[in-house]
Amino acid sequence: MRNVPDTLDRSVVAEIDARLERIAADERVAVPWAVESGSRAWGFPSPDSDYDCRFLYLRSANDYLGLWPRRDVIETPLDKVFDVNGWDVAKALRLLLKGNATVVEWLTSPIVYRGDVGFRDGLLDLAAEVIDPARVGRHYLHVGRNQWDLESEFVPLKKVFYALRPAAALRWLRTHPGSAVAPMDLATLLREGDVPNAVMREADELMAVKAVTRELGEGRFPDPLASFVLSEFEAAHEAYENADATIEAWKMARADEFFRTLVR
């Protein structure tokens, strides 16, 4: 599977493809899934946004059985254009059970550099079975809080998006009880979360500006967005902050079974 829009720089995409090939050969791993993450996949890129390629990989059974565990991340040199790194599927599965939504986001990215559909569907099915919506909610709450800062009158407008998207994900979870696999892009989160018209209007306007502006600079956090973010964080704190962190044994067993099947 491959889904790379024409809006992406062809030379950059070619280099990402080459890096993925080198990683597979040099590290002796399989790369069943590689996507774009970050602002391009979230739906609010700037003209100078870098490329955030994220991938999942598998090692051989012999590597997993060795006495000296390999690192569970693979990273390539970071620069102004390229940010390419990935996680071992074993790491991804452990984080998934803890409620880390990053894994699910990668699986639902609209920009796919290379992908095994069976791998993606199997992992998404597992996520729907074992992931706890409350833990996902707590994940988004903590991510959003790290970007939330109204102590100053003016804030970097880029950070508005990094607080707004987790808030929109929290709203989506609240309006889709029992579901834990939220959409990745901001526009879909807002639309399916049935947010107030003022929030949608302000978000659309800010995304349109960001799409044609290399540097947004600083400004006041738009009042409708600030009120929306704060209210969703408060609701999520009540609902998710004290969620049980215990991972049930049957979920661990299902993840083990899935992982062993992939390796075999």
Image: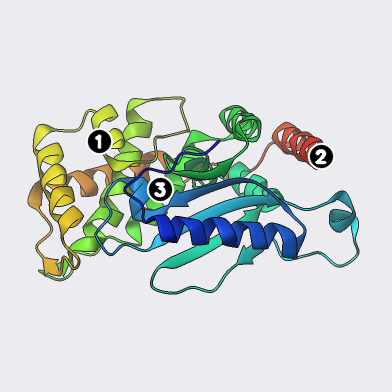
Using residue 25 as the reference point, say whether residue 42 is left or right of it: left
Residue where numbered disc 1 is placed: 190
Q: Disc 2, disc 3: CB below 8 Å?
A: no
Kindly identify the amino acid type of the residue bearing the numbered disc 1: Leu
Q: Name the secondary structure under disc 1.
A: helix
Residue 126 on image: x %, y %? 63, 31
Q: Nearer the viewer, mark 2 or mark 3?
A: 2
Q: Name the secondary structure under disc 2.
A: helix
Asked if one can make out residue 226 in the rendered structure from this viewpoint, the answer is no
Q: Is residue 48 above or below residue 191?
A: below
Residue 29 on image: x %, y %? 74, 55
Residue where numbered disc 2 is placed: 260
Between 85 and 168, the one lying in front of the other is 85
Residues at marks 3 and 1, CA–CA distance in whole angstroms: 15 Å
Residue 246: which quarter of the image? top right
Q: Is residue 47 above or below residue 1?
A: below
Kindly identify the amino acid type of the residue bearing the numbered disc 3: Tyr
Residue where numbered disc 3 is placed: 140
- Dot 1 or dot 2: first in sequence order is 1
Residue 76: which quarter of the image? bottom right
- Dot 2 or dot 3: first in sequence order is 3
